[in-house]
Amino acid sequence: MTQSNVAKRALITGVTGQDGAYLARLLLAKGYEVHGLKRRSSSFNTGRIEDIYQDPHDPDPRLVLHYGDLTDATNIIRVMQDVRPHEVYNLGAQSHVQVSFETPEYTANADAMGTLRLLEAIRILGLQDHTRFYQASTSEMFGKVRQTPQDEDTPFHPRSPYGVAKLYAHWITVNYREAYGMHASSGILFNHESPVRGETFVTRKITRAAAAIAHGRQDTLYLGNLDARRDWGHAADFVKGMWAMLQQDVPDDYVLATGVSHTVREFAGWAFADAGLPIRFEGEGAGEVGISEADGRILVRIDERYLRPAEVETLLGNPAKAREKLGWEPATTARELAREMVEADLAALRQPT
Ligand code: NDP
Ligand code: GDR
């Protein structure tokens, strides 16, 4: 096999998560040999990649999973040494904003220090001229927004332990690029969702509940801040942008977003309509409810436990740089995304258990 025919090797941390699953599929389709870091868990955590995960006894596996954890430097160095990846995508993280208020130290360890451990592993092993690095930065770094829409030059003001940890990870990635000439890029990604979105993020929580209520398996959905605005896109579109960043000659940082934002209330209205249960919202504050247009049942209520100690009220991204430099375009609107997610959750409930 000539050098040019040798498959590129990619290492994905967080391969078992939403984005990891979409990115692994994309890279396999492009002919990569994909290696993923998988945490030890007491139950299976590979549900999202089951269909692409081959028997480990396959003599020529294209997707190889390695046990590992971003909090363990020895393990990161060993996996990096074994794989010697051409591209590293650091998607692993304690990614839930509200949970980060409960587990701030762990979140910092995994999300901030974990990123440093990966960058150091590349440097210690002398791979800085061989390995390109992608960091999963986030619109949560903008936090308390002072400029709308947000782009690569908007000042940061994170509002959660998660946002703060991700800001460290973002700047350490910039620093390793500047200090050691590493091909290290950050994607500052706005919210992106899919039918395999984690069940406790608001979109999936809503679409699962709308489907379950439509099937008579749940009575009420409890939510927090209905006024929060988010710029929601589709994970399948966003992983294409991640890959495109690492194909550039020069590393850089890019915002990926749709450029349109909606409230949680709007998203809930779409999802219930798509599940065949149109609702209208009435009342104010903690007393606001979502009422079935058909029979007046209260299907959505507020539970204050879902309010955050500090909230990011509104996010709206400007993806002009990614559009111009990467040729990246989001293909799916939030409205289409809601429909796809509800349909998938309804279909799952129709499966025999
Ligand atoms: P998920 O929560 O779906 O996936 C997170 C992944 O990280 C899972 O594979 C999880 O493993 C793994 N993980 C968690 N902690 C550790 C650890 N200590 N060591 C190794 N792996 C760990 O997140 P998404 O796929 O939605 O997001 C991917 C990345 O992008 C994250 O870094 C997130 O913070 C960031 N991001 C996400 C956005 C979004 O809207 N989705 C927007 C902007 C940034 P397990 O399956 O075992 O839990
Ligand atoms: P976010 O996503 O915090 O933006 O982080 P999430 O879906 O958790 O919240 C979005 C907004 O909805 C409001 N909200 C609720 N949120 C949850 N989870 N549960 C509820 O019941 C609820 N009710 C209202 C929240 O207050 C918030 O304003 C996601 C994660 O994927 C991060 O990893 C990523 O970095 C950012 O998106 C960009």
Image (tube, rainbow, N blue to C red):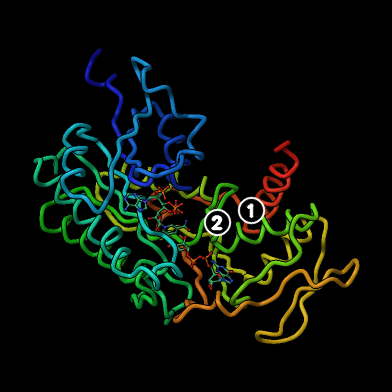
Instruction: Choose top left, top right, bottom left or bottom right for residue 127.
Output: top left
Q: Residue 154 carries which label?
A: none
| Residue 336: percent from left, percent from top | 67, 53
Left or right, 101 with reference to 135: right
Say whether disc 2 or disc 1 marks the residue closer to the N-terminus. Answer: 2
Asked if ligand 1 lies within 8 A of label 2, the reply is no
| Residue 346: percent from left, percent from top | 73, 47
Mark 2 and mark 1 residues within 8 Å of each other at the beta carbon: yes
**Front residue of this view, candidates 302 and 336:** 302
* Residue name at image x 58 percent, y 80 percent: 304
**Front residue of this view, candidates 295 and 124:** 295
Question: Is 66 rendered above or below residue 210?
Answer: above
Residue holding disc 1: 337
Left or right, 126 with reference to 334: left
Left or right, 12 with reference to 258: left
Query: Is label 2 in a helix, a strand or a loop?
Result: strand
Amino acid type at image mark 1: Leu
* Residue name at image x 66 percent, y 77 percent: 302
Which quadrant is home to the N terminus?
top left
Residue holding disc 2: 233
Image mark count: 2
For label 2, count other residues whose C-alpha is less than 10 Å away and answer few (under 14), some (14-19) or many (20+).
Answer: many
Which quadrant is home to the C terminus?
top right
| Residue 111: percent from left, percent from top | 30, 60
Residue occupying the far front of the picture: 42
For label 1, count other residues whose C-alpha is less than 10 Å away and answer few (under 14), some (14-19) or many (20+).
Answer: many
Amino acid type at image mark 2: Gly
Query: Is label 1 in a helix, a strand or a loop?
Result: helix
Rounded to the nearest angstrom, the CA distance separating label 2 from label 1 is 7 Å
Asked if ligand 1 lies within 8 A of label 1, the reply is no
* Residue name at image x 77 percent, y 69 percent: 299
| Residue 188: percent from left, percent from top | 38, 60
